[in-house]
Image (cartoon, helix red, strand yellow):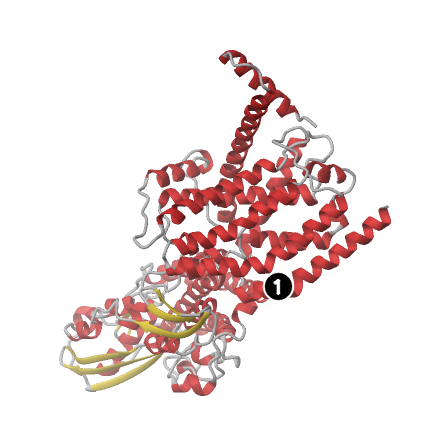
Amino acid sequence: MDSLITTMGIKIASAIQGVLGIAQSAAINYGIAALLVGIAVMIIVTIFDYLFGWIERKLVAKIHLRHGPTRVGKYGLLQNAADFLKLFAKENIIPANANRLLFLGSLPIVAAIFALSAEVLPLTPSFYGVDLTLGLLIVFVLISFVPILIFIAGWASGNKFASISAQRSVMMLISYEIPLFIVIASVAMLAKSFSFISIVSAQSSLWYVALMPLGFVVFFIALLAELERPPFDLREADSELIAGWLTDVGAPLYAIALFIDYTRVFVGSMLIVLLFFGGWNGPYLPPSVWLAIKVLAVAIFVVIVRATTPRMRLDRILRLGWIWLVPLSIINLLWVFLLAIAVV
Amino acid sequence: MAETKINIGPVHPSTHGVLRLVVTLDGDTVKHVEPHIGFLHRGVEKLVETRMYMQSPSYMEKLDYVAPISYDEAFVATVEAALGIEVKERAQYIRVIQLELQRIASHLLWLGTAINDVGQLFSVFMWCFKDRDIILRLLEEATGGRMFYVNMRLGGLNRDLSPGFANHAYKVLDYLEHRIKEYGSYLESNPVFMERMKNIGVMSKAEAISMGVTGPTLRGSGIDFDIRANYPYYVYDKLRFRTQFENGGDCFARYKVRMDEMQESIRLVRECLHTIPEGDAIGMPIRLIGPQPKEKEVVVKRELPRGEVMMYMVAEGQRPYRFSIRAPSFINTSVLQHLPRGHRLQDLFPILASVDTVLADVDR
């Protein structure tokens, strides 16, 4: 199935080749088209990150009874741009007892992982890079690398707070990853596919959140932990570990960390919308608008959770994972199993 | 697993000042905590000995910048005791009003910072600061100062209450009563908050007494002791004052005591505003002080928001010969050596917050 953007990409690619006077080749065409789609998705992700950064600052400020950014640009809209410029203009300090390669390398890799998983997510029925048959699985395999990379980054910085944060990262991993994957399995079971496009089209009449509310709750909680959002932000616990695994990073790397912060909210909100809220399905409005509305709504909810819940304790998260989330996700799996039998 | 030593402070987001804790960790369990203090030592006691009596209140206020009026009042009361000066009746009422308002402001600041330490709940921090600001504005209306007041004078005050003060105060108190209740119900219905506070840093009655803690930290261990009730000063014995205490001994009990104390202070201020007599409340101007002390050696005890302060002064001529403070935060800080032992690293911060130390007060 060729998407609109891919066909357009291939047309543009062949035009470029014509101008350059290279012999036409399907493989090169496809490569250039994939690159173009990739760039388009990255632009969209950047726009989301920028907007989300502004929304988060403004919304949290409103909950705090503050104003938030007001000075740079109208309603402080340019504040994030100013901050990024400032961060990139600063010196990148590397601690003396840090492992240079791992310390400098792991953060960009984490950023790349989230960017890569954003590439796999389809944005509308006709706008996506590749419709992989195992797209869902690939996204979660990519995201599962993140805690390990964070462990490496924390360890490599040679800071005690960072290494405690790294240990927490691995401790948390064993508590939320299993329920997350069980819920994904039940989604795939219900849609009989791992491809996002099929999962979304299977929800055209009824959203999965209505079919398995329990699974949604488990998924949302586990995803918050996976994305390191409050109340599960133990890795970055401000009032305890200063900045956790980011304690020693310099300003440019911290800008990358901010990019990671926002991109993972994009990936997380997209996953929730695609798997449970019918993706781009919706009446009257075009699919892309529906998707944007739903993703922003989920992102705003994530911000509200941040501003209203205190941070949990590490051992309590483990308990929550094993006593509540794992059994509930298994119950959800059984429920989906029964549903699938009933439908067949 | 090998033991890790980490330094929490003197520059750390949740030590609120320059407290340095050297924490020995076994995995995630706290094995040993060693508080290091003294980064903010200014030698205030010696400074007071070089000055005339009424030159010192402004130094006293900076000892506990969260509750300046309370320290100011304690010092002026010490000087009054040494010089044998009676406080005018209206001034007594006004002092109680200001002390209790200051107590609410101080506990509100504590609530905000403590909740932020417990779980990054910055929203409550901002709300509490906003409410505290309303009290500061009220105190500004009464005294002329926003943060540091220096309003106490020997035998009375610098300024009487402004004519519209009572009406304004009633409005603020109604609002605060509602807000504090709301914070309480919001926090106590939050399971995450409750499990971070309940059964954390338990201090038994015997421990509390033997470690010499005072104030809400003591009353959180179920001991009914408050200087305002047990050794009443000013008009506290005329007011219907009930000591607030909780039996838990954990962080939650200490939190609850402070929440109840805020409500109790609101009641006290209302009662004072109802019963305050007319009359003169202005004290002696600073330049007129010159009488010889009647008593040479005085000890004055006061209940500050953070606990019991005891001021010892040997008065001699125009300035004190010896002056010493038993600071509540200093004694309470020593508890940090014992309470977190065996808890998780994350529990150290609720414990640190629940003891409520002000480092300027610890180091003096």
For the residue marked with disc 1, what is the amino acid? Leu
- Report the number of discs: 1
In the rendered image, is residue B197 in sight? yes
- Residue named by callout 1: A320
Q: Is residue A317 shown above or below A115? A: below
Q: Is residue A153 above or below residue B234?
A: above
Q: Up-down: is A180 above or below B317?
A: above
- Residue drawn 68% across the image and 26% down it: A2
Task: State the residue in front, A44 or B83.
Answer: A44
Question: Residue B323, image x and y in percent?
Answer: 21, 79
Task: Find residue A267 and report its horizontal and vertical position in percent.
Answer: 58, 42
For numbered disc 1, what is the local secondary structure? helix
Q: Answer with left or right where residue A198 lies relative to residue B230.
A: right
Q: Residue at x 72, y 46 (%)?
A: A188
Callout 1 crowding tier (Cα within 10 Å): few <14, some 14–19, many ≥20: some
Where is residue A32, by image quadrant?
Answer: top right
| Chain under disc 1 | A
Question: Quick one: quadrant of the N terminus of chain B?
Answer: bottom left
Q: x, y (%) of residue B142?
A: 36, 62
Between residue A275 and residue B355, name the one nearer to us: A275
